[in-house]
Amino acid sequence: MRRARVLIAGCGDLGMRTAARLACDARILSVHGLRRNPPPIADGAIEWVKGDLADPSTLDALPEDITHLLYTPTPGARDPRAYQRVFVEGLRNLQACPALKSLQRLVFVSSSAVYGDHDGNWIDEETPVDPQGFNGRILLEAESRLLEWGASLGASACVLRLAGLYGPGRTQLLDRLRQGLARAPIAPAHWANRIHIDDAAHACATLLMLDSVAPCYLGCDDTPLPLHELYASLAEHIGAPPVAVGPAPFGVGSKRMCNARLRSTGWSPAYPDARSGYFRVDEPK
């Protein structure tokens, strides 16, 4: 059996955690991480490739015969142009690379932002999409491009729509709670969905190496929570002020995500509830 050569395009924190999991898989020959500025210190799990997804002239150094692609870039800014450059134009630039003509599996890391608001109801992969913001609209365009690319190669492809990521180094919410800046509605409740970054990396590695994949998976933990309950638990744990009532986050939408399809692959979250998950990664009080 031919061993896989994996390219992680846009290899940031999530990509590096995925690579660490893949390094333990005997089916993997090599894992290559593409980013604009690779770390100066070598990583034993990753062979770094310097390149900019938005600049096709920098992609000539890709290794030959890549068989598996994980596409997980991060925009340089939260604006439509930055999203378009990395998610749509970057994907188009990769598609033109000769090194990627033999792909067997493509996985695109997308977001639950494509679903918009569903009034707190449960959603799954069959729920109609209705993005509220530019990010969801651009991600949908990129999803379609990746699935079409896979079909043109005769390869299997899927998208992984992640809930809100948290984990080590992601302290923005905790900082806002400590500063008394976080707000959450109570009536009606706004439902929040989360996934620990290590569980997200596990999902990426699983979908890359699964025998066959469905076109779409939702990546989330087992426990959607009313936002005010999540914030109250975190605030109490870190000694932050009580959370005031306020509007829901703009453009996110209230929904409860179901992870049954992802669980059917054999994946399960090590952090099934974000309340305990945050507590395990937060620094001591």
Image (spheres, rainbow, N blue to C red):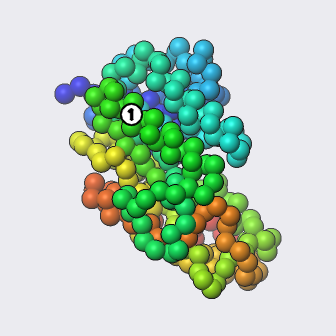
Residue 71 position within the rendered picture, expressed as x and y whole percent measured from the top left: 48, 37
Q: Is residue 237 visible?
A: no
Above or below residue 112? Residue 186 is: below
Task: Tell me which corner region of the image, top left, top right, bottom left or bottom right, holds residue 154.
Answer: top left
Identity of the residue furthest to the bottom in this view? 187
- The image shows residue 38, relative to residue 112, as above or below, that is above
Does residue 282 appear left or right of residue 274 in this picture?
A: right
Residue at x-position 72% and y-position 82% = 245
Q: Nearer the viewer, residue 131 or 257?
A: 131
The residue nearer to you, when weighing 112 against 194, is 112
Q: How many marks?
A: 1
Residue at (55%, 61%) from the top-left corner? 116
Against 164, is 16 above or below?
Answer: above
Could you tell me if residue 63 is visible in this image? Answer: yes
Write down the quadrant of residue 152 in the picture. top left
Label 1 crowding class (10 Å Cα cut-off): few <14, some 14-19, many 20+? some
The residue at the point 68 percent across, 38 percent down is 82
Amino acid type indicated by mark 1? Glu
In this figure, which residue is indicated by the disc labeled 1? 148
The image shows residue 137 at horizontal and vertical percentages of 57, 48
Q: Is residue 162 above or below residue 57?
A: below
Position of residue 46 measured from the top left corner of the image (x, y, whole percent)? 48, 31
Q: Quadrant of the C terminus?
A: bottom right
Quadrant where the N terminus sits is: top left
Q: Is residue 74 left or right of residue 44?
A: right
Percent x, y of residue 171 = 68, 60
Which residue is found at the position 62% from the left and 65% from the top? 282
Q: Mark 1 falls on what kind of element?
A: helix
Is residue 56 toward the left or the right of residue 65 in the image? Answer: right
